[in-house]
């Protein structure tokens, strides 16, 4: 019998936390998967190390100068990986005919165009880049539908929800017997901090997440609870849920990765160690299961699971996300853009922790919300919001 050849995987954002975890899982199954294209923003040296190890067909950098450096390093090392650069190249390796699956793990709005390219090309899309759904949920889901792409959520909560949703496809949550989605949140490092303490938080403190190791942007989003807000919007699009059907539950241990409640009173949950290799392996092999390298959950050691209501008074970002979800149109894209600018400024100690929600709220109040028509219209809303956010910082400096 003929042995089937390994699937070609493109990893967008290969040098990031999700990218490296994906490579870790792939390396455990060389008979099933091979790295076809690995991409990064500007870190040529980090991408070179990955090329040495995984020998992809393509390595793509956003920046041209970094691509030149990488090409030199590969030439000297005698590695045949072809180097490309720029946004068009990212789209190309996300949609090439020989690609079987795409891990969309670029951080932020920068991930939108390549993720859309994978959706239009009908790929198996493993979606970590939640900002794509926040900005362009309607267009992205429509592209997936029209092309017949398979969409698998990587965010641990959405992956958990996906695992416990009805396996049959129903026209909506209600006819599938689903009453609500219970989206769990760790509460971040400042779960018990007072308002006064939150005003003093430094980026060093905020970068110290209790349960998960992640890139800097999502780590700050977890501390403000904006990450949970973005995930509420993500859940709306992935599962066709109304805002009322999504409830956020703070669960500090991050053992239950989310739950679905049914009309008969059943609540189904997915549990596991907080390790992103579980959802990654699930998405790679779906509907089969493969080893991810994650060990058994030690329930005796965990012993207790706690649950609390989120406090949107101390964490206004969560309330802002529910607001933009209800407003619709370009509002979520504006929130996302303002948040990206605010997080970057906070990481550079240019603004305080509680300035993050203040800045976003101000940008939203100054923006005109328009219906979503196409990607250029969303990118225009994103750019305008970034401009307003920059002006806010100049004025309040
Ligand atoms: P990270 O910062 O560790 O890595 C980001 C990757 O994107 C890097 O490879 C970087 O080179 C690339 N990149 C950054 N800016 C780019 C640009 N302008 N153009 C092209 N490439 C660019 O981030 P991460 O923690 O791996 O998160 C990636 C995505 O996955 C985010 O959207 C995040 O919200 C989501 N996510 C991450 C986790 C996690 O545990 N880390 C969990 C759930 C969801
Ligand atoms: Mg998550």
Image (cartoon, rainbow, N blue to C red):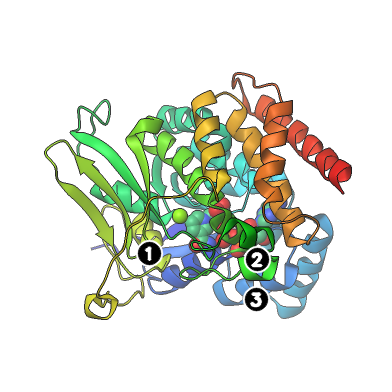
Q: Callout 2: helix, strand or loop?
A: loop
How far apart marks 3 and 1 lie (CA) works out to 32 Å
Q: State which mark lies toward you, 3 or 1.
A: 1
Image point 40% across, 56% down: which residue? 156
Spot occupied by residue 211 in the image (x, y as percentages of width and height): 45, 70
How far apart marks 3 and 2 lie (CA) works out to 12 Å
Closer to the chain start, of discs 3 and 2, is 3
Instruction: Count how many numbered circles sit on residues in the image.
Output: 3
**Relative to the observer, which residue lies in front, 369 or 188?**
188
Q: Callout 1: helix, strand or loop?
A: loop
Spot occupied by residue 249 in the image (x, y as percentages of width and height): 36, 51
Closer to the chain start, of discs 3 and 1, is 3
* Residue on which the image places disc 3: 49
Image point 66% across, 36% down: which residue? 361
The answer to whether 218 appears left or right of 383 in the picture is left
Q: Which image quarter is the N terminus in?
A: bottom left
Question: Which label belongs to residue 81?
Answer: 2
Question: Which label belongs to residue 254?
Answer: 1
Image point 53% across, 52% down: which residue? 225
Closer to the chain start, of discs 2 and 1, is 2
């Amino acid at each position: 019998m003929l042995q089937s050849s390994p699937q070609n995987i493109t990893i967008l954002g290969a040098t990031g936390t999700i990218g490296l975890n994906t490579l870790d899982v792939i390396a455990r199954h060389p008979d099933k998967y091979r790295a076809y294209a690995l991409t990064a923003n500007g870190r040529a040296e980090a991408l070179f190390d990955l090329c040495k190890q995984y020998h992809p067909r393509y390595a793509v950098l956003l920046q041209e100068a970094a691509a030149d450096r990488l090409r030199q390093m590969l030439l000297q090392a005698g590695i045949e990986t072809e180097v490309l650069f720029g946004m068009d190249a990212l789209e190309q390796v996300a949609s090439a005919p020989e690609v079987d699956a795409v891990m969309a793990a670029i951080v932020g709005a920068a991930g939108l165009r390549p993720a859309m390219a994978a959706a239009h090309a009908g790929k198996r899309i493993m979606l970590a880049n939640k900002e794509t759904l926040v900005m362009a949920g309607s267009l992205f889901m429509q592209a997936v539908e029209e092309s017949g792409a398979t969409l698998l959520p990587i965010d641990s909560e959405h992956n958990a929800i996906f695992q416990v949703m009805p396996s049959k496809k129903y026209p909506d949550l209600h006819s599938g017997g689903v009453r609500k989605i219970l989206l769990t949140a760790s509460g971040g490092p400042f779960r018990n901090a007072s308002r006064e303490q939150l005003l003093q938080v430094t980026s060093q403190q905020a970068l110290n997440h209790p349960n998960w190791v992640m890139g800097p942007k999502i780590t700050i989003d977890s501390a403000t609870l904006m990450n949970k807000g973005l995930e509420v919007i993500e859940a709306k699009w992935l599962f066709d849920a109304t805002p009322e059907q999504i409830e956020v539950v703070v669960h500090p241990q991050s053992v239950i990765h989310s739950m679905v409640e049914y009309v008969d009173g059943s609540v189904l949950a997915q549990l596991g160690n907080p390790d992103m290799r579980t959802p990654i392996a699930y998405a790679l092999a779906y509907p089969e299961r493969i080893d991810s390298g994650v060990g058994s959950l030690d329930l005796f050691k965990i012993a207790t699971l706690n649950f609390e209501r989120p406090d949107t008074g101390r964490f206004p970002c969560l309330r802002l996300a529910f607001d933009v979800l209800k407003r619709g149109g370009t509002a979520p894209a504006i929130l996302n853009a303002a948040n990206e600018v605010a997080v970057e400024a906070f990481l550079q100690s240019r603004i305080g922790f509680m300035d993050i929600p203040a800045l976003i709220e101000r940008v939203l109040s100054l923006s005109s919300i328009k219906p979503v028509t196409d990607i250029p219209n969303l990118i225009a809303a994103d750019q305008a919001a970034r401009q307003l956010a920059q002006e806010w910082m100049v004025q309040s400096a």
